[in-house]
């Protein structure tokens, strides 16, 4: 059986004999898939079986051509490579058996004594038919033939050549149809092998390189933070800018991190697939755009987990079982649950040396201030208790001293955050208005209400000029003008 696998060579995606697997661009695969569907539908009617399956998708750097289809001239673009979305697929045909025979090969005359051989069975050696004279072992008529079918006897293994016209009488019409369908498939494969990768995306989906795309996202995040439209803006940004080397290095770090990550949710899993190019990125991708933020959170969580693990190592068992001890440390509530006898609570106290004390009780770890104010464990900065050691155990690598019969003998309350009083707020507002009034040169005003008049003073009328005074002023004005113009007053 003939097998193929494709590779990039001389700016073309071409085939090599290897396995019954092919590699082509995704665009070509989708076109061929539609065309082969029509052929496979016909093969189903005659009972022929086959295998056609998409195995894998990946991205490959492929050089491209400009092609003049009228002049059949290829204009190479040797310096230009594009990231192309490719598909690996398998195409195989099971042996077609009719009666006592199965189809072994289709032989087609080309020129002179040279033939095309489509081997369909491993028992056929194509060398036996490359230069063979096309004949029909059924009718034995001597005339020029363009195509014959090689049939293999299932019982003896003997191979016979039968002309297309005699197939009906020899084994049945189905064989001729099967041979024709195999030729159709082979034509599609030949077109696949000879078709160049054309410039302009006609035969490929251009892909986005995750590293550069992620670096662009990191650069924008550093400037503006993360936002919903980042995945689109990063693509536009890449058209005009080039990411800085430090951001490219950071992107490489993020990709390596996700490559070695064991995902715990669907986002991490999908981000890993896109970042490692197990699936091509052909458009704006939210997984890659958010990957840096997710990476920072995961690293921060790992640091926190490592810190907790380190803190757990500090804890040591204290005293002996039955000892009465006094413990001072930071209290907290681990968990609580309701039972038929009430609530059971687990308290945890960590002393200054990092030693951990556990108290499981149905009582409350509480205290009261001098004025009777109740203070629960979560409101305590520090607590001092007298207790009895019940046992020593270990949980998640942390040594714990389990205590019982606890009694609070001292505590330090968590200092509340300082808040502004209403009086201070009023003063601040007043000061604010004073500053605004000064800046705007606006008179400050006091708003009053419930007014009652108890006295008044009448406004004095303004003094007005008489007509006589006005005439004198006008005369004086003309005298002054005359002096300035050196004109004698007649």
Image (tube, rainbow, N blue to C red):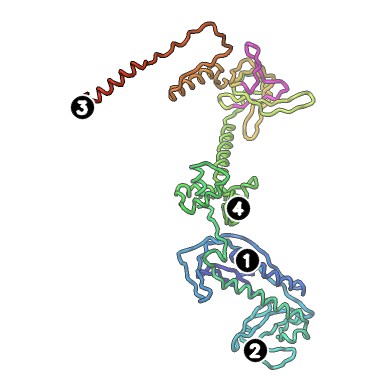
Q: CA distance from mark 4 to mark 2?
A: 55 Å
Which of the two discs, 1 and 4, labels the residue nearer the N terminus?
1
Residue nearest the viewer, comparing 444 with 187: 444
Q: Secondary structure at mark 3?
A: loop
Tag nearer the camera, 2 or 3: 3
The reply to whether residue 292 is visible in this rendering is yes
What residue is shown with label 1? 29
What residue is shown with label 3? 487
Q: Secondary structure at mark 4?
A: helix
Tag nearer the camera, 3 or 4: 3
Which of the two discs, 3 and 4, labels the residue nearer the N terminus?
4
Q: Which contiguous range is marked in magenta? A: 355-379
Q: What label sits on residue 142 in the rendered view?
A: none
Q: Above or below — where is 118 with respect to 243?
A: below
Q: CA distance from mark 1 to mark 4?
A: 22 Å
Residue at 57% across, 27% down: 354
Q: CA distance from mark 1 to mark 2?
A: 37 Å
Pointer 4 local density, CA inside 10 Å: few below 14, some 14–19, many at least 20: some
Number of marks drawn: 4
Residue 98 x, y percent position in the rendering: 77, 78
Residue nearest the viewer, comparing 238 with 396: 238
Pointer 2 local density, CA inside 10 Å: few below 14, some 14–19, many at least 20: some
The reply to whether residue 328 is visible in this rendering is no
Q: What label sits on residue 273 in the rendered view?
A: 4
- Give the left or right position of residue 20, taking residue 170 as reference: left
What residue is shown with label 2? 133
């Amino acid at each position: 059986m003939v097998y193929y696998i494709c590779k990039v060579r001389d700016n073309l995606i071409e085939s090599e004999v290897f396995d019954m697997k092919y590699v082509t661009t995704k665009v070509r695969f989708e076109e061929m898939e539609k065309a082969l569907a029509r052929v496979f539908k016909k093969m189903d009617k005659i009972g022929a079986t086959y295998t056609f399956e998409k195995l894998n998708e990946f991205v490959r750097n492929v050089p491209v051509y400009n092609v003049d289809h009228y002049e059949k001239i290829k204009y190479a673009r040797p310096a230009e490579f594009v990231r192309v979305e490719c598909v690996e697929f398998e195409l195989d045909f099971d042996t077609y058996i009719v009666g006592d025979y199965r189809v072994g090969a289709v032989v087609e005359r080309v020129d002179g004594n040279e033939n095309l051989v489509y081997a369909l069975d491993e028992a056929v050696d194509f060398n036996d038919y490359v230069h063979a004279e096309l004949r029909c072992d059924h009718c034995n008529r001597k005339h020029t033939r363009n195509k014959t079918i090689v049939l293999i006897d299932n019982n003896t293994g003997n191979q016979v050549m039968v002309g297309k016209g005699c197939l009906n009488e020899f084994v049945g019409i189905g064989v001729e149809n099967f041979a024709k369908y195999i030729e159709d498939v082979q034509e599609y494969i030949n077109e696949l092998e000879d078709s160049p990768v054309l410039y302009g995306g006609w035969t490929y989906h251009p892909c986005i390189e995750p590293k550069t795309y992620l670096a662009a996202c990191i650069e924008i995040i550093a400037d503006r933070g993360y936002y919903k439209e980042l995945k689109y803006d990063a693509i536009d940004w890449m058209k005009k800018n080039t990411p800085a080397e430090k951001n490219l290095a950071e992107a490489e770090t993020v990709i390596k991190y996700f490559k070695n990550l064991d995902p715990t949710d669907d986002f991490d899993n999908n981000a890993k697939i896109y970042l490692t190019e197990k699936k091509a990125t052909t458009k704006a991708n939210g997984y890659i755009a958010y990957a840096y933020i997710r990476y920072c959170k995961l690293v921060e969580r790992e640091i926190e987990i490592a810190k907790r693990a380190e803190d757990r190592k500090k804890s040591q068992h204290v005293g002996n079982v039955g000892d009465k001890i006094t413990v001072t440390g930071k209290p907290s509530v681990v968990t609580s649950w309701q039972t038929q006898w009430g609530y059971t609570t687990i308290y945890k106290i960590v002393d200054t040396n990092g030693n951990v004390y556990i108290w499981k009780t149905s009582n409350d770890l509480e205290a009261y201030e001098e004025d009777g104010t109740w203070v629960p464990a979560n409101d305590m900065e520090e607590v001092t208790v007298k207790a009895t050691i019940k046992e020593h155990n270990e949980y998640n690598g942390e040594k714990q001293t389990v205590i019982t019969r606890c009694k609070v003998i001292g505590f330090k309350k968590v200092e509340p955050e300082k808040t502004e009083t209403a009086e201070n707020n009023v003063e601040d507002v007043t000061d604010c208005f004073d500053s605004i009034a000064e800046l705007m040169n606006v008179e400050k005003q006091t708003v009053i209400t419930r007014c009652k008049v108890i006295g008044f003073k009448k406004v004095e009328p303004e003094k007005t000029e008489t007509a006589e005074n006005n005439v004198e002023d006008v005369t004086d004005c003309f005298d002054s003008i005359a002096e300035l113009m050196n004109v004698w007053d007649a």
